[in-house]
Structures are given as structure tokens and as C-alpha cells.
Amino acid sequence: SHVIAVSSCTAALEISLAHLGLPAGARVGVPAWTFISSALAAVHNNLHPVLIDVEPSTLNISPAALAAALEEGLDAVVAVHFGGVAVERTVHDLCAAAGVPLIEDAAHALGTADARGLVGGPGTQSACFSFYATKNLTSAEGGAIATDNAELATFARSHRLHGMSADAHARYKPGGGTHYDLVSPGIKANLPDLLAALARSQLRRFDQM
């Protein structure tokens, strides 16, 4: 129900993990086969990435290996839909049963669906997308956070712009004001207007692309 544009999928992952408020050194499960940003998003939040084996047939996180890692103790999981192949829904069920938040790295998976629908469904903290130059929808560089968590959406809109309480649109629209507060030690990860326009032009016809 909320989609927040950011500068990259890496930024989307970092913001999603930051919102969890985990203590330094908390353990975040990531697949052993993935692009490095899946793990670096944890490192940049002072968290400890725990590599989890993948299924040879899909290169996605192995439910059996995840179950074992959850038994040993995880504080969050980043699951990657590698090559556009949706992770098994067992992954969602395992995380839900353990009470561990699940973040989906959907950099390869814009438009990917399984039997239950598009990726990023129930039980997911957020799905993080990429609009990099090699993706099926591109703004040359960019990304997005999709979530049903209203608190995460509010946090992301602020955190992507230094942690400011009001972005440029809010400050300079009719009736706005230049005052803002710093509500968190955020990062600079907003999607520039020109790149957003490029992505939007493709999004309108994504089903035909």
C-alpha cells in the first residue's frame, strides 16, 4: 500500500533494515549466492550478515538451511528472488513462525509473481526493487521500497533525505513552510526528479514491455 522511491535497491535494503532498530551485531540471514549489496546493507547498519546456503536449482535461499539458521538465532532475514525466480513461500512461513522480520531483495523481480501473487506479499516487512540500467524497468539508477507497514513508509520518506521531517515538496508547495526537524540520522538516498520521470514513463506501460 506504500511505495517509496529511493536512489537504489541497496538504499532500499539499508533503510528497511535501519527501520528495524536492531542492536549492533544483530544477525541478519542473507543467501550465500547474491550480489554483495544484500550483505553490505546489513554491514552498513552495524549488523552481522549470516550466509545461508541456496538451492542449486533456483539459486534462492534454501528453506532447510534457513530453518537451521533460525534455530541458531537470526534477528532478520533478507531473501533474494535471484534472476526473477520467486523464493519459496516456505521462507515466509518459517520467518513468520519464528517471529523474525523478512525483507525481500527484489532487485531482479519487478513483475515476478508466484501462486499467491506478486512478490512482497503478506509476512514481508518490505520488498526492495532496483531500477538500475540492467533491469527490465530502468531509470539508469534508482530503486523503491514497497511495504504495507505505514511506520516503515513514514520512516523511509524521512530517512532517504537526511532524516528531515519534511521534503522539498512538503516545504515549498502552497501552504508549506521552510521549517523542518531532524527526526533521525538519515542518509541521502532520494530519487532525483529526472530519473523518477524516466522510470514513471516506463511504469505506465510496464505490462506491455
Image (cartoon, rainbow, N blue to C red):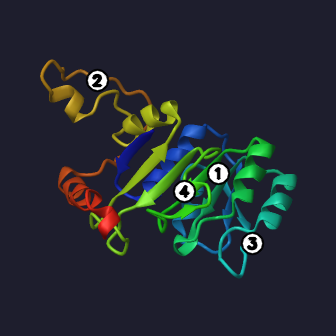
| Mark sitting on residue 47 | 1
Q: For marks 1 and 3, give the CA distance.
A: 19 Å
Q: For marks 2 and 3, give the CA distance.
A: 45 Å
User: Who comes first in sequence, dot 4 or dot 2?
Assistant: 4
Question: Which mark's residue is nearer the viewer, 1 or 4?
Answer: 4
Q: Are marks 4 and 2 in contact (CB under 8 Å)?
A: no
| Mark sitting on residue 180 | 2
Question: Please, what is the three-letter code of the amino acid marked with disc 4?
Answer: Val
Question: Which mark's residue is nearer the viewer, 1 or 3?
Answer: 3
Q: Residue furthest left?
A: 174
Secondary structure of residue under mark 2: loop
Q: For marks 1 and 2, give the CA distance.
A: 30 Å
Secondary structure of residue under mark 1: loop
Quadrant in the picture for residue 67? bottom right
Q: Is residue 187 visible?
A: no
Horizontal side, residue 123 vs residue 126: left or right: right
